[in-house]
């Protein structure tokens, strides 16, 4: 049971923070009360994560102050009082689960203390007891996120900040996390939840602050705290052309076609994972089609998507391309020829991007001869023009392509990751959880980009060398996202295809979700 604490509110007054030409916080004022869960919502790039990092002492504000117990606190003082769960797990992949749990609480110069009974019980509650001595890099993203949550809960902090903490968790794991948040709030801790999932904010938060353009525009509570009202407030932070994209996507959904109606851009035959995650997969993806791969953790669905991009060993036949195909048949050379034509964006943005480089450098990071002259030289102006063109095409919200990658919001970072992957003009674009932790406005933009890339007539790329892909494959766990963006879904259960669903056959996401869950259970 969480011990009770007493204390006063956190008061944030006039916080300002700028990254180059980008204004992240523009006079932010907000108060967090003990005993409540304060929800934070806003479009990507609105300043939510910057606010959280400033509260945690990870970022220094340019102006403004933060008061706790009525006294102004500096970054070092705040850091001693705060624990944070990030959207992208901030863990040590070379350490075990138990060692990660103890980081910062070793009480010695070297990490050699063993976890005690209470910590063992916490790991068991988080479903991690079987992995106590497993190095974290060997575990999936969901287990890494649960490890970070466990480490936060093990600390005797007064302020708990949750920044999209359940983006990689199952529904059951998420509900357990929210129960723990309520226990913390009931004990008098100060709890902040940043989330793009409107339902979770309405159900679990006592109040929701709407952060728009670095300011808290309104705080919703009581009868005003509804999903419709939060969604209406969010529209303020979404560009009108993005709203138009949502409508255009609805129109495009009516024209979705099955792969049986045309040539296959990607075809798998007898595709089998070498370590047994999946076997004898036969499937095809049609020209211009978006196909979702769905399956519970451990079903083989995630490994299947990885294998299409050459990141999981598999044998069998994988054919890429409509006009000139490359086939991976288990031979290393042929496999590379095929997967070289596949662009991949993984679930963890930290693994897709280079945070020590600028926005522009990230956008161009996968290109080579495409942006060099005949002598193989790279010219600064050419690079800048190319980066600015891609940033404009992918609607990346940044003050300049020279801004550091870390200054962008999660949604804009994701658009950079996708832009970098498509800049090489792969025939097939494969994505894992493409809008994890992304707000509704950025989601609509990403959906538009995926549809444009799959469309044989759609043009994305550098000036004078625009190209298009032939199909998009994505691994996704959210029914609403699959329903919105995919043409078909291929459901994997116990390493095999248990069935396929065509999205145009469904009038609502609820009926689709029911059939998908049935297939995930094995049909």
Image (spheres, rainbow, N blue to C red):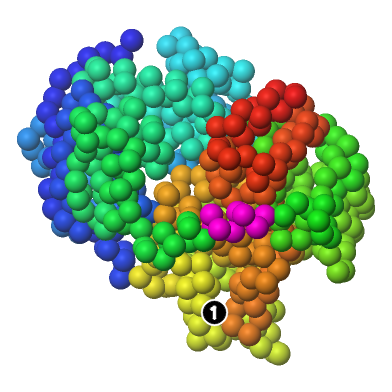
State the residue at coordinates (53%, 40%): 480
State the residue at coordinates (55%, 32%): 510
User: Is 253 covered by the magenta stretch?
Assistant: yes
State the residue at coordinates (67%, 62%): 454
Residue 489 drawn above or below residue 424: above
Q: Is residue 451 left or right of residue 470?
A: left
Quadrant of image for the N terminus: top left
Indicate the position of residue 156 as horizontal and vertical percent values. 30, 23
Indicate the position of residue 223 as horizontal and vertical percent values. 21, 31
User: Is 474 covered by the magenta stretch?
Assistant: no
Nearer the observer, 408 or 498 = 498
Nearer the observer, 491 or 279 = 491
Nearer the observer, 508 or 409 = 508
Indicate the position of residue 57 as horizontal and vertical percent values. 27, 44
The residue that label 1 is drawn on is: 386
Number of dots carrying numbers: 1
């Amino acid at each position: 049971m969480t011990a009770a604490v007493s204390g006063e509110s956190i008061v944030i007054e006039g916080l300002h923070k700028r990254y180059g030409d980008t204004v992240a916080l523009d006079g932010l004022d907000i108060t967090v009360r003990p005993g409540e869960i304060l929800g934070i919502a806003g479009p990507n790039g609105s300043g939510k994560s910057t606010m959280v990092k400033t509260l945690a002492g990870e970022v220094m504000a340019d102006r403004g102050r933060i008061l706790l117990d009525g006294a102004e606190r500096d970054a070092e003082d705040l850091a001693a009082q705060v624990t944070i769960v990030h959207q992208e797990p901030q863990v040590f992949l070379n350490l075990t689960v138990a060692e990660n749990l103890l980081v910062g609480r070793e009480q010695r110069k070297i990490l050699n203390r063993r976890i005690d009974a209470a910590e063992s019980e916490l790991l068991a509650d988080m479903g991690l007891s079987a992995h106590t001595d497993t190095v974290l890099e060997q575990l999936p993203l969901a287990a890494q996120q649960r490890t970070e949550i466990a480490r936060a809960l093990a600390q005797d902090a007064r302020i708990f900040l949750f920044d999209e903490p359940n983006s990689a968790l199952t529904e059951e794991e998420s509900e357990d996390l929210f129960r723990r948040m309520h226990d913390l709030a009931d004990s008098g801790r100060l709890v902040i939840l940043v989330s793009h999932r409107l339902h979770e904010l309405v159900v679990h938060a006592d109040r929701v602050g709407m952060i728009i353009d670095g300011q808290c525009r309104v705080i919703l509570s009581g009868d005003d705290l509804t999903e419709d009202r939060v969604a209406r407030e969010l529209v303020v932070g979404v560009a009108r052309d993005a709203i138009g994209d949502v409508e255009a996507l609805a129109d495009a959904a009516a024209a979705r076609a099955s792969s049986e109606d045309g040539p296959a851009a990607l075809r798998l035959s007898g595709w089998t994972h070498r370590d047994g995650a999946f076997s004898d997969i036969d499937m095809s993806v049609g020209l211009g089609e978006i196909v979702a791969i769905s399956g519970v953790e451990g079903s083989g669905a995630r490994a299947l998507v990885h294998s299409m991009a050459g990141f999981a060993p598999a044998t069998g036949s994988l054919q890429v391309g409509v006009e000139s195909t490359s086939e991976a048949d288990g031979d290393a050379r042929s496999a590379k020829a095929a997967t070289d034509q596949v662009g991949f964006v993984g679930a963890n943005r930290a693994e897709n991007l280079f945070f020590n480089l600028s926005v522009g450098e990230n956008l161009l990071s996968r290109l080579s001869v495409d942006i060099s002259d005949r002598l193989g030289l790279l010219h600064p102006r050419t690079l800048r023009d190319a980066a600015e063109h891609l940033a404009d095409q992918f609607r990346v919200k940044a003050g300049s392509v020279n801004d550091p990658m870390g200054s962008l919001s999660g949604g804009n970072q994701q658009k950079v990751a996708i832009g970098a992957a498509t800049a090489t003009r792969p025939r097939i674009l494969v994505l894992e959880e493409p809008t994890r932790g992304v707000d509704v406005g950025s989601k609509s933009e990403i959906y538009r980009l995926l549809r444009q890339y799959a469309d044989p007539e759609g043009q994305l790329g550098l000036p004078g060398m625009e190209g298009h892909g032939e199909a998009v494959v994505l691994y996704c766990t959210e029914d609403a996202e699959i329903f919105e963006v995919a043409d078909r879904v291929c459901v994997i259960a116990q390493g095999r295809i248990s069935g396929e669903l065509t999205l145009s056959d469904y009038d609502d996401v609820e009926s689709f979700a029911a059939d998908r869950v049935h297939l995930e259970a094995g049909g």
